[in-house]
Image (tube, grey):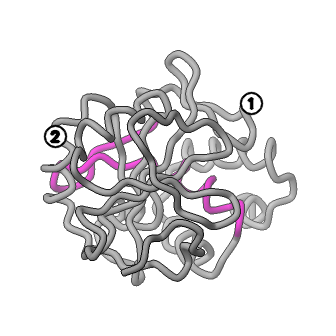
C-alpha cells in the first residue's frame, strides 16, 4: 500500500473487525479515560447491532494524546487534516484544534484499528469543540457497556452526529431515541438549542 501522505483518507477505509475485548486489552495501559464513540457506542448502549458500521471511533481527551504513543509504540499513527489528508503523527508533535483525529494501525499493510478522536475539556468538564458553552462533568461523560467496555453516553454521541445529518446519523438517532431517558433528552435538547437552533431532531424530541 502506498504511503498515505497527501491521499484523501476516504479512499483508505480498511478497518479491523470490531473486537471490544481486543480494544480493551490494547488500552489497558492507557493511563487516562477513553470511550468507544460513534454508532458503535450506541449499539453497545442499546445492546444490539442496529446497522452495519465501517470504522471504529474512540474518544480520548486532547491533553492525554501523548499516551497514544506510549500505548502504540511501534504502530503507525497518522493524524487527519481538515483537507482530508493523513500525515504521520510523531511523538514530538502536539495536535491542536482543528486537528482532532488520529488513525492507528499495526503496520502499513494492515487494516486500521480505530480512529482516536481528541475531545476538549476544561478542568473537570468535557467541552463540546463546536460550542464551548456546551459542557458536561467528566464523571458523566461515559458509562460502561455490557462486557465492561467504556462508551460515550448517547446524548454526547448524538450531539456529534447532529452536525452532519448523514443517512447513518439519522438511522442512529431513530434507533437511539426510544431508549433515551428524560434527562438525556433534556441535555441533548439544551445542547442543540445552543448549537443548532430549530434542529429537526429537537423538533422530533419535543413532538
Is 140 displayed left or right of 68 in the figure? right
For mark 2, does the 10 Å Cα neighbourhood hold few (<14), some (14 to 19), or many (20 or more) residues? few
Q: Residue at the location (55% across, 65% down)?
A: 177
Badge 1 or badge 2: first in the primary sequence: 2
Could you say where residue 184 lies in the image, as x and y percent from the top left? 55, 46
User: Foreground residue, 75 or 154?
Assistant: 75
Tag 1–tag 2 contact (CB < 8 Å): no
Is 196 displayed left or right of 154 in the figure? right
* Quarter of the figure with the C terminus: bottom right
Q: As displayed, is residue 32 above or below residue 42?
A: above
SS at mark 2 in the image:
helix
Look at the image and say whether residue 159 sits in the magenta stretch. Answer: yes
Q: Residue at the location (42% across, 40% down)?
A: 60
Q: Which residues are magenta?
A: 141-164
Could you say where residue 1 lies in the image, as x and y percent from the top left? 36, 81
Q: Which residue is mark 2?
A: 28
| Label at residue 133 | 1
Amino acid at each position: 500500500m502506498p504511503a498515505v501522505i497527501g491521499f484523501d483518507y476516504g479512499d483508505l477505509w480498511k478497518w479491523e473487525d470490531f473486537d471490544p475485548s481486543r480494544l480493551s486489552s490494547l488500552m489497558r495501559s492507557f493511563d487516562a479515560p477513553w470511550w468507544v464513540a460513534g454508532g458503535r457506542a450506541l449499539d453497545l448502549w442499546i445492546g444490539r447491532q442496529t446497522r452495519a458500521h465501517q470504522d471504529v471511533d474512540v474518544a480520548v481527551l486532547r491533553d492525554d494524546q501523548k499516551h497514544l504513543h506510549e500505548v502504540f509504540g511501534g504502530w503507525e499513527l497518522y493524524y487527519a487534516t481538515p483537507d482530508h489528508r493523513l500525515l504521520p503523527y510523531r511523538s514530538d508533535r502536539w495536535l491542536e484544534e482543528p486537528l482532532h483525529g488520529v488513525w492507528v494501525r499495526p503496520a502499513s499493510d494492515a487494516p486500521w484499528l480505530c480512529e482516536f478522536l481528541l475531545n476538549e475539556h476544561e478542568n473537570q468538564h468535557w467541552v463540546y469543540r463546536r460550542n464551548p458553552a456546551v459542557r458536561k462533568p467528566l464523571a458523566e461523560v461515559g458509562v460502561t457497556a455490557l462486557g465492561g467496555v467504556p462508551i460515550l453516553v448517547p446524548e454526547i454521541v448524538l450531539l456529534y452526529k447532529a452536525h452532519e445529518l448523514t443517512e447513518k446519523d439519522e438511522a442512529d438517532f431513530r434507533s437511539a431515541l426510544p431508549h433515551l431517558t428524560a434527562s438525556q433528552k433534556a441535555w441533548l435538547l439544551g445542547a442543540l438549542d445552543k448549537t443548532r437552533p430549530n434542529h429537526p431532531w429537537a423538533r422530533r424530541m419535543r413532538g
